[in-house]
Image: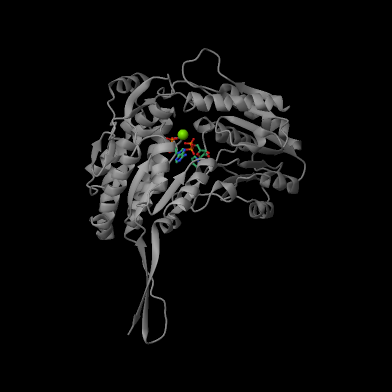
Amino acid sequence: MTDVPYEEWRRRAARLSPHTGHHIGGAFVPSRDGATFPAVSPRDGRTVADVAAAGAADVDRAVAAARRAFDEGPWPRLAPADRKAALLRLAGLVERDRETLALLVSLEMGKPVAEADGIELRALIGCLRWYAEAADKLIDESPRTDAASLALVTREPVGVVGAVVPWNFPLTMAAWKVAPALAAGCTVVLKPAEESPLSALHLAALAAEAGLPDGAFNVVNGHGETAGRALGEHPGVDVVAFTGSTEVGRHFLRYAAGSNLKRVWLELGGKSPNIILPDAPDLDAAADTAAWGIFFNAGEMCTAPSRLLVHRSVAGRVLDRIVDRARTLAIGDPLDPATEMGPLVSARQRDRVLSYLEAGEAEGARLRAGGPPPGGDVGYYVRPTVFDQVKPGMRIAREEIFGPVLAVLEFDGVDEAVRLANDTDYGLAAALWTSDLSTAHRVSRALRAGTVWVNCYEEGDMSVPFGGVKRSGNGRDKSLHALDKYLDLKTTWIAL
Ligand code: NAP
Ligand code: MG
């Protein structure tokens, strides 16, 4: 974890001169038409840099570079051990520039700099190393057939991958696509969120420095409706790997249907239930984890445990503790290493979250903590918010808020808890707190979610897959399974 003091982070922020072009074919370039957009920091609403905004012509140029790098370039043809070495060099350079990248993330999207360094950068480095190490350990198959034939089943890189990601963990979300795609031998065009282009551009510069061939990894910045759409519709893109909202996920399926039927992998939103039973091994730990889970990253988490389902007999005790935590959390400048919760990513996101606070009260839920922070308009802050007396039909119980807002529902029996938990369009994650082994297994099986945590939350490892069911998406990031998204099976049948 970083021991750089607040003063020093501010000095570095003032001196910063980030990359602002697109990174295409190994070099930074401006937009063809010179268009830019401001990268605004949510800590004070100031513009950090003006960044090139891609139009269709720029996306076309990036896809052409990735296409050339795939069809003619060395990257897919390298020995896997050489791809591994290049990705390990990249991980080493990220480690070297770790504090700069943490600063960029913190400035552009408001994550506390200590978490940007300790969580986001650690995840990025770990992910790059993990897929680098996997690159030369993939083994193809030769199924037994008849004596007169030889069958080979080989895994081949699918081609050009368009990766489109959100801003909440800008580097981790990018790495979960880019690292396995590159390890598999694909080439990539990454479109970061318009709120978080700066860290992605620094990563692109490091990829070039690490010796990745020109065009293997490209970054285009800009708006979803133009740059994201152009990538989604481009006939030269073979696969789209998307993380973001369910609504935009639908767009990508339409873009694919209307163009070349490219494969579309979707990691989408969530409204994850966190069930606390009275026999939880430690109720205080369950309450602390529930609070941490919803307030971490200002609630801008696809897996946020935004619906707390708590057994009526322990609800008072659990809730009091969560409300206490909500009231004492250190909110402030993300560049201050003592800050526990920074601002939301943008004024728009803050206003969206505040609109749910109004909706919650209007629909009859009780506000136990939270609301807009006192003290003016500098930075896009919302205080940690807790609603109890929430009913399953309320908007705050059904819609993804993507902010530090907890909806608490009470239940009387386990079956009722499971029913409530599954009463959602989403299926990204769920959690359960119990000391009873068979309850743990029975409820885990009954929960419709890509991940179920028992007596913990948000735990994991690169070795386990991550993704959702229902409207939370398809496919899986992380783990060896993620490589399957970027590899096609080819059958070669040889008559002997
Ligand atoms: P978003 O609005 O869906 O945007 C995600 C990405 O799609 C951004 O790069 C965005 O570009 C682009 N985009 C937006 N509109 C587009 C369009 N019409 N066509 C093509 N691309 C378009 O999501 P967000 O607000 O950045 O992030 C929050 C959402 O991400 C939440 O729903 C959250 O649950 C989800 N999320 C899911 C996971 C997961 O792993 N399941 C992880 C993190 C976040 P611009 O920024 O330029 O608009
Ligand atoms: Mg957006």
| Total marks in image | 0
Quarter of the image with the C terminus is: bottom left
Q: Residue at x 38, y 38 (%)?
A: 121
- The answer to whether residue 477 is seen in the rendering is no
- Name the side, left or right, on which 97 lies relative to 168: left
Q: Residue at x 40, y 66 (%)?
A: 489
Q: Residue at x 64, y 55 (%)?
A: 445
**For residue 352, which quarter of the picture?**
top right
Protein image colouring: one colour
Along the line of sight, which residue is nearer the eye, 271 or 255?
255
Instruction: Return the residue found at the far top.
Output: 375
Quarter of the image with the N terminus is: top left
Along the line of sight, which residue is nearer the eye, 12 or 68?
68
How far from the left and from the top, in percent, is residue 244? 49, 41
111, above or below 27, in the image: above
- Name the side, left or right, on which 364 lies relative to 334: right
Along the line of sight, which residue is nearer the eye, 12 or 284?
12
Q: Residue at x 36, y 43 (%)?
A: 190
Instruction: Return the residue found at the far bottom.
Output: 147
277, above or below 322, in the image: below
How far from the left and from the top, in percent, is residue 409? 71, 36
How far from the left and from the top, in percent, is residue 275? 66, 42
How far from the left and from the top, in percent, is residue 107? 38, 26
- The answer to whether residue 18 is seen in the rendering is yes
